[in-house]
Image (tube, rainbow, N blue to C red):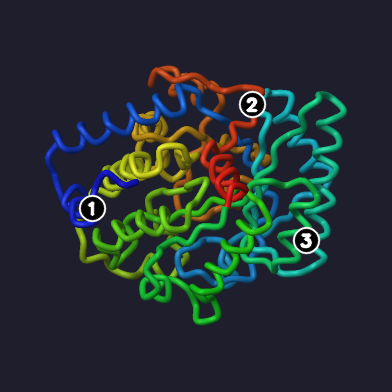
Amino acid sequence: MNPYREQEIVEILNSNEPEILNSLLQAAHNTRIKQLGKEVYLRGLIEFSNYCPRNCLYCGLRKSNEKIHRYRLDEEIIIELAMMAYNMGFQSIALQSGEIDSQEQVDFLAAIVEKIILSSKQRSHQSLGVTLSVGELSYQQYLQLWQAGAHRYLLRIETSDPVLFKKIHPPSQLYDRRLECLDALKDIGYQVGTGIMVGLPGQSNEQLAQDLTFFQKRDIDMLGLGPYIPHSDTPLARVPDRHERDVFTLTLKMLALARLAMPDINMVASTALQSINPLGLRWGLMAGANIIMPVLTPEEKRSDYSLYDNKEQKSMEEITAEVEAGGFKLGYWKWGDSPHYFQRREELKQG
């Protein structure tokens, strides 16, 4: 239950008072420690392809961006990277790409998930946990990937406001279709994650407050929420924003408010947050995040997975130092599943 009404949230987001920010962050931190402890769970991020059939107005991977060098990792390399994550003690990976748009690609991914799980089970009683983020698919395709062994799925809404959604996507991409996909994922049994960009051109604090209500109504298990960072080769980068705002602080407030409203979900300290502030990771954790996603994509491909400009990618040594400096500890050899998911499933069973 959200401790704040929507109007109170808007007032917090509008405020420039350091005392309000500090009080909010402290409350979120206390809630996180009480509900989830000090552990920060790892998701080794493998960006296995930057091909995308979509033309989202904000994304550097958009189909019409001809300046980008496209790539698709081979099956062997993906499995090798997953096993590297396992050997490092990550215990969970996230496979991410531009949107998949063919059954052949779904079959390819399902086979990889099966092989990753089989290979990791041969080394331990518990396999690698697998999160997917490959866009809008059919119910049957989501089911196929679930049956292959994936158990978490991130599908960001980007904004819960249908009008703003329409402004940042081409006409072929429909808000209602995104909701249908989120419903399908939940119905199949996935731990379901969604999220937004904070600071989009034309986005109001009232819309951000409504986003928080949206997350609660959708009863999500995971949240991927980060600042909007323009990509110079996208149409949205050329749209002026009438709001002058501190997007970093606004994102921290949204994380903290989300933690207070949804105490037992998993929340990511996003790479984007780290990209706009050198201490973004530590601040994200202090605001209530409990998941980090170190990038395992081969170094020669990382710059090609350019969702936005100036993407920051930290080494494990840097990540460890920041986590410990914030008073947290890395949760090695644990899946780090969302407690909310199990609570939600239990309530579903009980009718």
Q: Residues within 10 Å of mark 3 (few under 14, many from 20)?
A: some
Q: Where is mark 1, residue-wise?
A: 5
The residue nearer to you, when weighing 322 against 107, is 107
Q: Earlier in the sequence, mark 2 or mark 1?
A: 1
Q: Position of residue 71 (x, y in %)?
A: 71, 56
Q: Where is mark 2, residue-wise?
A: 334
Please tell me whether mark 2 or mark 1 is closer to you in this view.
1
Residue sitting at x 36%, y 71%: 164
Please tell me whether mark 3 or mark 2 is closer to you in this view.
2
Q: Are marks 3 and 2 in contact (CB under 8 Å)?
A: no
Q: Where is mark 3, residue-wise?
A: 106
The outermost residue toward the bottom is: 171
**Mark 1 and mark 3: Cα distance apart in space:** 42 Å
Could you tell me which secondary element the residue under label 1 belongs to?
loop
Q: Position of residue 157 (x, y in %)?
A: 48, 62
The residue nearer to you, when weighing 154 against 280, is 154
Could you tell me which secondary element the residue under label 2 belongs to?
loop
Asked which quadrant contains residue 82, the reply is top right
| 160 lies above or below 279 | below
Q: Is residue 80 left or right of residue 51?
A: right
Q: Earlier in the sequence, mark 1 or mark 3?
A: 1
**Mark 2 and mark 1: Cα distance apart in space:** 36 Å
Q: Is residue 326 left or right of residue 8?
A: right
Residue sitting at x 63%, y 36%: 44
Q: Earlier in the sequence, mark 3 or mark 2?
A: 3
Could you tell me which secondary element the residue under label 3 belongs to?
helix
